[in-house]
Image (cartoon, coloured by chain):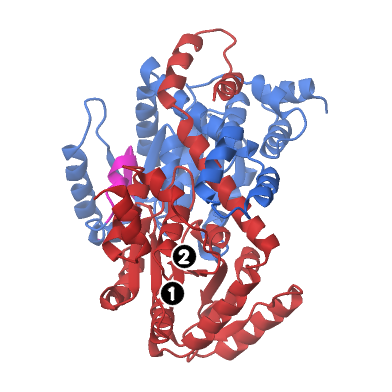
Chain colours: A blue, B red
Amino acid sequence: METAALISGLKQGDVKSLARCISLVENSRGAYEELLFSLKHHPEIPVAGITGPPGAGKSSLVNALTHSFVASGKKVAIIAVDPTSPFNYGSLLGDRLRMSELYLTPGVFIRSMASRGSLGGLAPKIHETIDLIKNAGYDLIIIETVGVGQSEVEIAGIADTTVVVMVPEAGDEVQTMKSGVMEIADIFVVNKADREGADAFGGHLKRLSAQKHSAQWMQPVLLTEAHRNVGAGALAEAISAHHKLNLSKEKQLDLMAEKTAHLVREALARRVQVQHIRERLNAQISAADFNLYRFTREMLADS
Amino acid sequence: METAALISGLKQGDVKSLARCISLVENSRGAYEELLFSLKHHPEIPVAGITGPPGAGKSSLVNALTHSFVASGKKVAIIAVDPTSPFNYGSLLGDRLRMSELYLTPGVFIRSMASRGSLGGLAPKIHETIDLIKNAGYDLIIIETVGVGQSEVEIAGIADTTVVVMVPEAGDEVQTMKSGVMEIADIFVVNKADREGADAFGGHLKRLSAQKHSAQWMQPVLLTEAHRNVGAGALAEAISAHHKLNLSKEKQLDLMAEKTAHLVREALARRVQVQHIRERLNAQISAADFNLYRFTREMLADS
């Protein structure tokens, strides 16, 4: 398919064209730059990140939230970020199976992306993937992490709204929880709220939230039972309300400058050629006063 | 203290000077570049990475391994990498307490480093920290991860020898284990080998290892009971044997070229100024044909 037809298909919301575009961009193949240069900026489409520790019910919540949006006639895209850890996270990824019915729901697009180690980040081309999906006419993008490793912090740099999901039992642990959770959460969800201690834990989070709210936003604390669809509507409303704060020109400039900086850093990193460095190293390493940090400064001047 | 005295203290193995040097370099403060330019290259000092899933007994193994080296008159440094995840890893970090007796053992240096999200990697200045420790005269450096997130893969890029620790129960999961584990492991350890299934699991790993060994090295599979110090001596020998393979000139060039590339990428990333990008963005964003990816290409040309 030629690029013009692919772009046209994307902008008409054709799912196959969207999937093809994402693959081309992920692999930096074909006319992927032309694709990216054709994209419009869509700040009005919210990107919600759902994070929280394993077992909090993130996938069930994504499921319930998606159904809530779809029921109101909206198109929803889900990006599921899988860890690159070589150890067995089968039990975590098994949760994803609960999403499987969504694969058959009209108006729902699901894409799984692998996180990676080399340069950090949720996934190498997640910004580009989000923009492709926005240009295909989806009304909401949900990013789900597996809740291990660094992805929880990074999701806050990518999503408009970060939803932190916990279970009532986490109340015992919240004292030792690193302060980072308070920093990244725009919305708190206490899921499995039919369990003992949910109200007490919710009250505790509300007091923490009240201590540090800004003039514009106080983190709401929502109780949900995602497996019974209880609370999904309220969460959908909270995401929409929070997203509106991101639409000011100042906030948009902040977000887009961060995103550009990220993309520039990635492009710079790709320029560094290990083979070239190796050749230069081979010529210098035998010198008696060889120092790797001085050599690094030389290579930096080359880049 | 002036820089010359600090460098002199470092090279004499003074622990306070070493700690001070690491802090200066971690924070890019003072004469940290002069410090780095004074370092010698020490490929003969092995760097062993210990990784594996939570609960495998990594800290106990580090403990046993350290005692084994110390008993033979060697100085050992341990770098413990803590996750930046905001969720509660108290139970994982609690394991570290088992190392606490080592804080009082002569000839043992322990440094805890936080991993970070922004640019990936085990910790921002781990390469520099390793070189500072080597110049302070330690005979072995052990890096321990907590076994969650991306650090397991990245440790293989930093350590001379990567030791993957598992428990017999992991045998049931090894079928679903991502192939990455086989890629990164130079040595397999089945810890808690007094438990049922240890021999069977060890045998299975040996068969996997035999299928993919190189001409130079076949991943050994060692059974240990770290809490009783069983098997630590054999592990120490395996680490020394594997490390010798890294001392060929070709292998050294590979390792140092990768390390330089990493350091250059980090330095390039630090050059990207979000505030400058924001100003340029502010001047362009109102254009009808504004495109973020075209703008990114302009900013890249600036960098």
Which stretch appears magenta?
Answer: A177-196
Q: Secondary structure at mark 1?
A: helix
| Residue A187 magenta | yes
Report which residue position mark 2 lands on: B147
Residue drawn at (45%, 69%) of the image: B141
| Residue B258 magenta | no
Q: In the drawing, what numbered circle is on residue B224? A: none
Tag 2: residue type?
A: Gly
Tell me where residue B59 appears, x and y as whole percent: 39, 74
Q: Chain of mark 2?
A: B
Among the 4 quarters of the image, the one containing residue B242: bottom right
Q: Tell me, yes or no, whether the two marked residues, 1 and 2, touch with CB atoms within 8 Å.
A: yes
Tell me where residue A207 appears, x and y as whole percent: 17, 44
Where does the C terminus of chain A fall, quadrant-wise?
Answer: top right
Which numbered disc flags the more N-terminal residue, 1 or 2? 1
Q: Chain of mark 1?
A: B
Tell me where residue A135 appears, x and y as whole percent: 61, 24
Report which residue position mark 1 lands on: B58
